[in-house]
Structures are given as structure tokens and as C-alpha cells.
Image: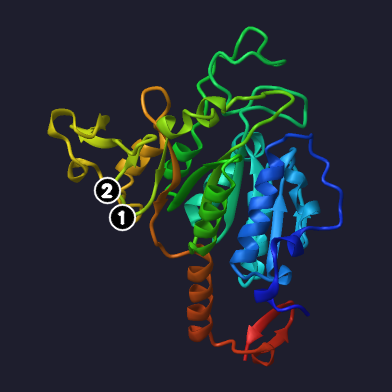
Amino acid sequence: MQEASALTYTDFKSNQSVKWCPGCGDHAILNSVQKAMAELGYSQEEVAVISGIGCSSRFPYYMNAYGFHTIHGRASAVATGVKIANPELKVWQITGDGDALAIGGNHFIHAVRRNIDLNIILFNNQIYGLTKGQYSPTSKKGFVSKTSPFGTIENPFRPGELTIGARGHFFARTIDKELKLTVEVLKEAAKFSGASVVEVLQNCVIYNDRTHEVLTEKGFKEERTIVLRHGQPMLFGKDNDKGLMLDGLNLKVVKLGDNGITEKDILVHDAMNPDPSLHLKLANMEYPDYPVAMGVIRAVPYATYNAELVEQIEAVQAKSKIKSFKDLVFSGDVWEVK
């Protein structure tokens, strides 16, 4: 068997033809995941890719690793079972904004709340693509679609807000076009012990083309997004001359030099702060009032469900009179301890 250290991203490509639409952001995400796995030194045998239903959920077919294409909204439930049954596996859950946040919302929030050691990649194109263009839980209010011909009257979910509200300990965001950043974020998510949620802003060229264009438009993305890195000041802009400060309890965009503001006045990102207050504010920033936050927003170490389950089982076994099957005898219709 080939050594894991010798693997490249091409070793994680399956022999299946990729059947996403030309130009779909899923292609870039697939390449980023394969590159991240190679750089992490994974072998194919230690990876399991679990998906639900949707365009993104074809992902397992295109990975040279273990995979399971499950049913609509149940990827979190199945991925949880896989991880509990075999804690040594690196379990990656691939899901979309419809699959995870609509029919799968219950499973998603509880996987996050329990801090199952999963890597959850949430493709967010703000539309149902596979079923031909209905509005999704993340579609913007007023969005016109086949199921909202006069514009949706619903407020959308913010995946970061939902993750942190479910007591999540890791949330990051990237965008399909930014391959280098996506690989960086996925590697950080993989190294995190617990439920890591990475929202990828992804483009559907057929039903919701250019939905994230305001953030990717050449010449403007540096002014409209901010890449957060732990321990570094929250600066952004083409010349890195803008930043974030607190104005009372609210975030405020400032420019270096104005009113004597220097880099020392800019907030320093602390992704590991257990208090989610500032992380929530950062995750909720929207253009044009704020730059949209990219990178790792929250990464707080915490005990995983997997580890605590093993500890509980071992503690119960240590106190139990039953040490093996031989300690049981059959008496009448019941088993009894000798």
C-alpha cells in the first residue's frame, strides 16, 4: 500500500466522471478537499465521506475513499453513527444549505451541540439546485424563485449564527473561488477535535448565478471581505488600511489614520475565546455595512462526544460485576449475574 506521506491530491480522485454543471463552484471545493487531505497526510483508508441529497451530495462518488451517499437531511445522523462506530475514521460530512438547514436541520444542530468529531462542509449557494431552483433556508428575503414567484417573505438562516447558537465550538467561512484560503480553512477544521462547520459560499451557475459576486468581484473583494486569523489584528482592504473596532457593544469599521486611529486600536482576533459574543457578531457581518468575515471565526477546544462516550463506557464496565459473557447464567426466561 502506498505510504500516506507520498499521496497527492490526485490520489484522492476517484475514477468516476464528475457530473456537476460546467462552472459550478462544487468543482473548486472538490479540488480543495482533495488537496487538503493530501497535505494533511491522510491515507484513503482512514477517510469516510458522508453526504445527504443535493448537488453537493454527489461528492462521495468523486472521492477515492470510503463514502456513503445517504438520504435527504440525514447526513449528520449517519456521519454521527459512523464516527461513534469507528472513532479512528476521519469523517467528512458534505451537505448543502437545503440538505442541512431544512429537512436536516434537527440532525445538524444536534451533531453540533454534541460536539461529534466531524468535519462538516456546508455548501451555501442560497438555492435548491438539484430540484431545479426553489428557494432555500439561506435565500435572501425577497428572492424570486419557482416557489416564491413574488419573492420570499422569509428571513434566511445565517449558518454561522445557527452553528454558534447550537453551542458550536468551530465555525469557519470561505468561498469557492478562493482555493488557497479554502484549503487553509479545511486543514484547520480537520485538526480541530470536535464538530467543525465550514460554510463555503458556492455559486450555482444555473439557478442562482453570481449570488456571491459582490464578494468575489475583481478589484473589490479585498474591500468587502476580511480574512480573520487567530492572534492577528482584524485588518482588511487593498492596502490593509481598514479595520474593526468596538463601539460600545457593536462592531465599527474604521480607517487607519482617521482620528488618530492606529493598528494598536484594532481588535485582535481571538478564535479560542469561549465567550461566543464577538464570534457571533463577526459571523453575522454582512456587506455593505461590514466586510464579510472569512477564515476561522471560532475554534474553542472542548471535550468531544466521542471521547466522553468511551470514558463513560469504560467507567461503567469497571464497576460492573459482569466482566465477560461467562459471568452470565440463564435462569428461566432471564439472564442473571453469577
Q: Residue at x 69, y 88 (%)?
A: 325
- Residue 204 is labelled as none
The residue identified by callout 1 is: 231
Q: Are marks 2 and 1 in contact (CB under 8 Å)?
A: yes
The location of residue 287, given as percent across then percent down, is 42, 25
Amino acid type indicated by mark 1: Gly
Amino acid type indicated by mark 2: Val
Along the viewing direction, whichever of 76 and 40 lies nearer the viewer:
40
Secondary element at tag 2: loop
Q: Which residue is drawn at 52% across and 48% down?
A: 181
The location of residue 38, given as percent across then percent down, is 65, 65
Q: How many other residues sit within 10 Å of disc 2, few (<14), some (14-19) or many (≥20)?
A: some
Identify the residue at the far top of this view: 150
- Residue 222 sits above or below residue 164 on the image: above
* Relative horizontal placement of residue 235, taking residue 129 as reference (left or right): left
Q: How many other residues sit within 10 Å of disc 1, few (<14), some (14-19) or many (≥20)?
A: few
Q: Quadrant of residue 211?
A: top right
The location of residue 128, given as percent across then percent down, is 70, 29
* Relative horizontal placement of residue 19, taking residue 246 as reference (left or right): right
Q: In which quarter of the image is residue 148?
A: top right
N-term mark: 2 or 1: 1
Quadrant for the N terminus in the image: bottom right
Q: Distance between the residues labelled 2 and 1?
A: 6 Å
Examine the rendering and report whether any part of residue 79 can be seen. Answer: no
Quadrant for the C terminus in the image: bottom right
- Residue 69 sits above or below residue 309 on the image: above
The residue identified by callout 2 is: 268
